[in-house]
Amino acid sequence: MTSTNIKLPNAEDLLKTLAQQLKPLLQNNTALVGIQSGGVWLMQRLLVLLAKEIAENAVEHGILDVSFYRDDYEQRGLKAENRPSQIPFEVENKHIILIDDVFYTGRTTRAAMNELFDYGRPASITLVALVNRGGRELPIAPQITTADIALDATQNLQLIQNTDGTLSLTLQSSSGKSQA
């Protein structure tokens, strides 16, 4: 069991660390793909932070909304903010860096990989998550993460985008209490 008084790391600091960890992976034939919505926010910010490396290597990027690919779609239903996926490049034989905000059970990642394979067969997929919160249910894990935070199943860690464009982590319990 985890403490209810968890000090959350600064998401902006984690983002800078993530950018440094991604630099060696950027090469020709690499593409960044963000998972809606937190993974997309991270990808957009990483594109800015890594602009020099991306320009040198022509790294393409795209967006996945995996809502229809989830194995719990019938339970979760449609979210109001569903957006179409946008993969404007050839996935076949591409080295994909799949970006998500918070890794939990692995089900979102499985759904994202299923959708990616509908676009073609990538050469490789590297999973990147800002935070690994524990609770994995599938044999899937991020290769790159900037923080590991053990949480109870009753706790929900979310990345939020503030009005000024910065990112923050929030923690909510099933009782609805929020902690920033």
Image: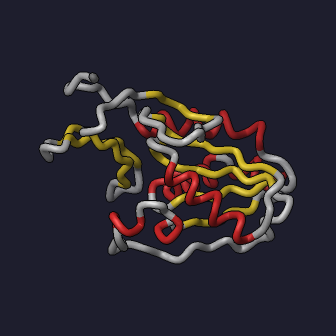
| Picture quarter with the N terminus | top left
Percent position (x, y) of residue 94? 82, 58
Relative to 3, is 135 above or below? Answer: below
Q: Position of residue 14 (x, y in %)?
A: 49, 35
- Tell me which residue sits at (59%, 41%) in the image: 140
**Quadrant including the C terminus:** top left
* Residue at 35% across, 71% down: 77
Q: Residue at x 54, y 59 (%)?
A: 35
Q: Is residue 61 left or right of residue 160?
A: right
Task: Judge left or right: residue 144 versus residue 31.
Answer: left
Q: Specify how the rendered protein is coloured.
A: secondary structure
- Foreground of the two, 79 or 21: 79
Residue shown at 58% from the left, 58% from the top: 34
Percent of width and height locating residue 52? 74, 49
For the residue pair 8 and 96, the one nearer the viewer reads as 96
Q: Quadrant of residue 8?
A: top left
Describe residue 101's horizontal placement relative to residue 143 as left or right: left
Q: Is residue 143 above or below residue 101?
A: above
Q: Total number of numbered labels?
A: 0
Residue 78 lies, in percent from the top left, at 36, 73
Q: Residue furthest bottom?
A: 84
Q: Is residue 151 above or below residue 64?
A: above
Pick the residue in front: 14 or 141.
141
Horizontal side, residue 125 vs residue 170: left or right: right
